[in-house]
Amino acid sequence: MAGPEVKDQYKVSPFLVFYLVHSVQVGVGVMGFQRISTKYAGNDAWISVLAAGLSLNLIIFLIYKIMMKEKGDLISLHHNLFGKWIGGLLSLIAIVYFIAMGITVLRTYIEVVQVWMFPDLNKWIFGTVFLLLVYYCLSGGFRVVAGISFFGVVIPFYLVLTMIFPLFYGHFRDLLPIFNHSLMELYEGVKGASLSYLGFTTLFMYLPFIKEPEKSHRWAQGGHLLTVFIYTTVMITTIAFFSPEQLQKTIWATLTTWKIAEMPFVQRFEYIGIASWALVILPNLCITIWAAGRGIRRLSRVSQQNATIPILVLILISSSLFARRESIDLLNQYTSKVGFYFVYIYVPFVFVFQYIKSKVGRSG
Amino acid sequence: MVNKMFRWLKKNRSPEKLKNLPELIRNLQDSGDFLHYESKQQDSSFFIYYFKTLVHETELNDHILPYLVEKPLKTLEDIPERVPIPGVILSSDLKEICEKVMRGFVIIRLNANATECALIPSQVKKARAVTQPEVEFTVVGSKEAFVESLDTNLHLIRKRLPVHELKAYEVTVGKLTNTKVVVLYLDGIANVENVNTVKQRLEDINVDQIVDNSVIMQLITDDKNSPFPQLIDTERPDRATSVLCEGKVVVLSDGSPQALIGPTTLVEFFSAFEDYFVNWIVASSARLIRIFAILFSILVTPVYVATLTYHYELIPKDLLSTLVSSRQRIPLPPILEAIFLELSIELLREAGARLPTKVGQTIGIVGGIVIGTASVEAGLTSNVLLIIVALSALASFTTPVYRMSNTIRLTRFPFLLFAHLWGLLGVTICFCFLIAHLLKLKSLGRPFLEPLYPLRVQDLKDAIIRLPLKFQNKRPIHLQSEDTVRFKTVTEKEKNDFHE
Amino acid sequence: MTRLFIFIVSMLLLTGCVQRSILDDIQMVTIIGYDLPEEENEEGLIKGVAVAPQYQADGRVDNSVFVQTAALSKEIRSQYNSESPKPFVSGKLEVALFSKDIAETEGIMELVDTLQRDPSIGSRVFLGISNSDMETLLRTNYGNVDTGTFIHDTLSHNSKHGMLPQTNLHDFLYNYYSEGNDPFLPLVELDEDKVKITGLALFQGDRMVGSIDAKHLFTFKVLHQKFSSNDSFTVKVNEEEHAAIYNIASKRNLNLKKVGSNKIEIHGKVLGVIKEYSGQKLTPAKLKEIERAMEEDIEKRGMDMIEEFQTQNIDPLGIGNAVRSVTRGDFNKEDWRQKYPDMDISFKMNVTVTESGVIE
């Protein structure tokens, strides 16, 4: 199976991969990823976050190695490596994973809004409107998806500045002593931190839409590094701001730190933060749903529009079915677990498999 | 349905139905202003036919007829030789004859049954004199504005751009009006694809009537269902010239004092032409103020509604007492209060626009003061909101392009609705819709949000800010110009020291 | 498509709305006070006093006071609603006061927990302990202001520029949950038609176990944190000479090098300006003398304070947290608690007078 043919006019410049990678990573995770990592790694959690981030740089490198050899997308890669049926099955799993990511993002965001702003928010109506928005973006093609992710990074970037306020309340002594946790604890912290980094695997799907994909490698790494930087800064701020037990009790630590922000014209920044977060969530949903729809289109003869609409309905229904905090937590845990293995085990495996297969193919 | 109507129109006026020239002339004689008489000389005679309302009669009598009567006319071929006016043609093509006579040509036949005739141009050229621009008035700079005559407008541009590369491609549009539309571009500078897009779209137009260039704008625009204008119209010949030099395409049409410019971008709608006449720092700050004003104008009322309806926590406590006491006597929820005020401002604006200038101004001032004060006193609106709405209306008028300011004011209403539904969250969602919409828009197939998205750093030199002229040495990337270099900057080597 | 669109819009308008809290249709509580009920039969219940300002159109502010008794603080809120013309909201809460009785007998965490759990309550809410009768304190008219803002501002400017350490909801929770800190809260009292800060209430866990008098607040703040203040500190140089030091900037430094041998040194460093001096002439020698007098004074007060803390086994200065930050391996809170009273904590002051006013 050959890679997809994408007309030049639908391709976007390699520089936008920076935003595509960054915006799909920063999502609902940032609002409360601190609790999970600090559970194991305590005040060294920022090391876990940093380590998880830097190790993923290597994974991105591997993804590019694989894709530069393949010259296609995940679907053709699976097809060529594992044959029609097993490859197709694996692609289907990847598509389900992308959809699950979409469900997680939407449901978690709705939960945040329900808990912090509108307890009686109708999740059906809100979900419908939000997914209509996603559909509106997707109908413009990948160019608009990339544009949304560009603005989804640039416009809410001012929120990073609000992290200054908790610094005034920071107890930086809390970061000491550094390296006071065992490697095992740090590893558990890495595992906890990796959920918030996931999503860049959508690279597998949209790489054919990039002009000169090999040039986009450094942008992808750059986008990821920005995420690492933001997460590490947020983590350090959080550790300094809360005492350990207090942080364990705080589900959405980032939102709680916003509560301390105060400006002459506005108080209680978390409301603005949650509202602005819709703009951060949007590219997240757009990219994952686009990747899923694109996958179905490549696997079958269904047009992307006809594939996307059922996906959106599926996301709406299933995200509304999760009603309780625990089930949402469970959903988050499962997607992060699958994502963790996808990234750390499956990608290196594919790399090695592809390498062996090309060696064997050449000699045989 | 529409097509059927056109076909009917076409049938009735089609010269094909008329078999020959005499029949055509008989047909034309139905109109009272169609003159025809026989000029009899001693041994020859000829027939003259024309519309007296289209023909310059003095010219006809002084400069055409004397040549025709000085010697007897033998054949029609004599006429072009005799009459010292270019453009005299001989024709027996009924369609051509019909078209020409409707444009002010004089028909000359040698006998009443001849099927061939000579056509002598003698149009009356009545045009308004070139006046000052009113919509895009600038304090400094040229004081000429386009008028309704296409020739005058072309003249205004040609005299500013005396180069042979300036091409004027002519298309006739409109089944009934037969409006002449001209596509202007600089050959070798403007992107061929852009020019062809415009030409193609103009040729594809299929309507009976072109009232104004605005109609053409609506017909050739990329997304017809968008409230955002995707082509700029200007009444300034200097602006038209300047964008031609950038590599854009200009469309002029007969009978319209406005030129269309494309492809354009969103930020261009917020740059006044005056920005190029002043120092770059002043110009840049003016642009920044304008962009701030636009955001303010769109967002401030929705944010007011959202905050007062849902997010009382956001209001600092010093402001709280002011806001609460100003709303104390008001029975309406913030959304109705805001819509009531916004609508009354729109009413004032609309009334002001429909009435004659003098009365309109009075209505604006009186209405603003009286209605505003009265509604606060009556307890219908709070004075805080009155200030906000008035300011946001004022801010929307800072947009240099009139069409855009209408759009901006319209954009506020969906935002208000969403703000009422979900507070600030709703505002963000509406904002997302707006961004997605803008991302989808194109102007002549070029991205509308450029240079912001796709981000082109080079084009930012003349977008949100305007850098000094020496930096404007490259044509914008989004125009894909055939010749990207405008001029070469000669940088003088400066001594890196204080002046002595 | 159009029909679908119309359907969606009308669905939105009909069912999409969420609970509104229009600014002038809600009862914004700005201060809430908790007290134990006086009657005997109300054992185990809590009396809550809430004040909500009523902003009038002419600029007047009236304070409505609501008093209810119930077992849970959220239950109190639903009882408030039953006697209020507008629904109660807590998003603009500025101050929460607890009576000394509650703080000493039952602990305040149960009440603070509801504040912490409610996302609409900000982290900057001031907490405080009061010895006055809560209802009288909150019923008092403090002029044409809302009571919450009045008390909030009193506490706020004192902790920003004065001698009061910072104590908002976040700080309290940080100290409460921290392994090596004990919380403290300001003590306020009704003083005719004003509210006066009378000192600091010290906690062990969520129970008040001691207090510091207002005149020792400066020493406490020097020991506790880095700060700069506009308040003055009066030094008694000798029997008849006094000097007042203003514009104080203070730093504290913990020397933890000898923790192994149970020794901790606290270094305080104060920079200040003399604004008032009752003696004759300020010579450099005199300045030195003033500095030394001040150093000795603060050192003595500080040592007394630290000893007091050690006997009560409370750690409002966060020494435990500092020790934790230099301890490798697990820091055991219980072990530390046992070790703390026997620690050898010393306190050294260094005072520098930088200016002596505009007159020589």
Image (cartoon, helix red, strand yellow):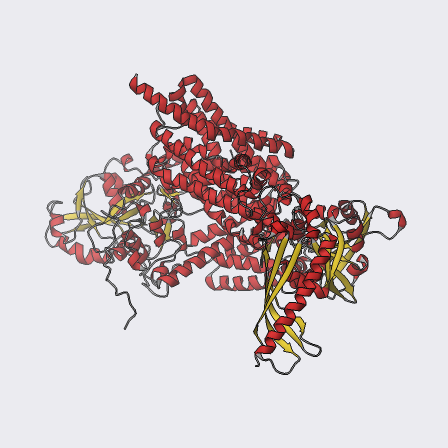
Task: From the viewer's side, name the closer residue of A288 and C160.
Answer: C160
The extreme right residue here reads C40
* Residue C294 point in image, percent of width and height: 64, 70
Task: From the viewer's side, name the closer residue of C37 and B369.
Answer: C37
Q: Name the image quarter holding residue A337.
A: top right
* Residue B457 point in image, percent of width and height: 35, 49
Q: Name the image quarter holding residue A58.
A: top left
Q: Name the image quarter holding residue A87.
A: top left
The extreme front residue here reads C261
* Residue B18 point in image, percent of width and height: 27, 36
Task: From the viewer's side, name the closer residue of A259 and B318.
Answer: A259
Taking the image as shown, residue B391 lies to the left or right of residue C128, namely left
Task: From the viewer's side, name the closer residue of A314 and C211.
Answer: C211
Residue C332 visible to an observer of this rendering: yes
Which residue sits at x=77%, y=58%? C130
* Residue B25 point in image, percent of width and height: 26, 42
Q: How many marks?
A: 0
Residue B335 visible to an observer of this rendering: no
Q: State which quarter of the image contains the C terminus of chain C.
A: bottom right
Which residue sits at x=65%, y=75%? C243
Q: B208 above or below B329?
A: above
Taking the image as shown, residue A125 lies to the left or right of residue A199, namely right
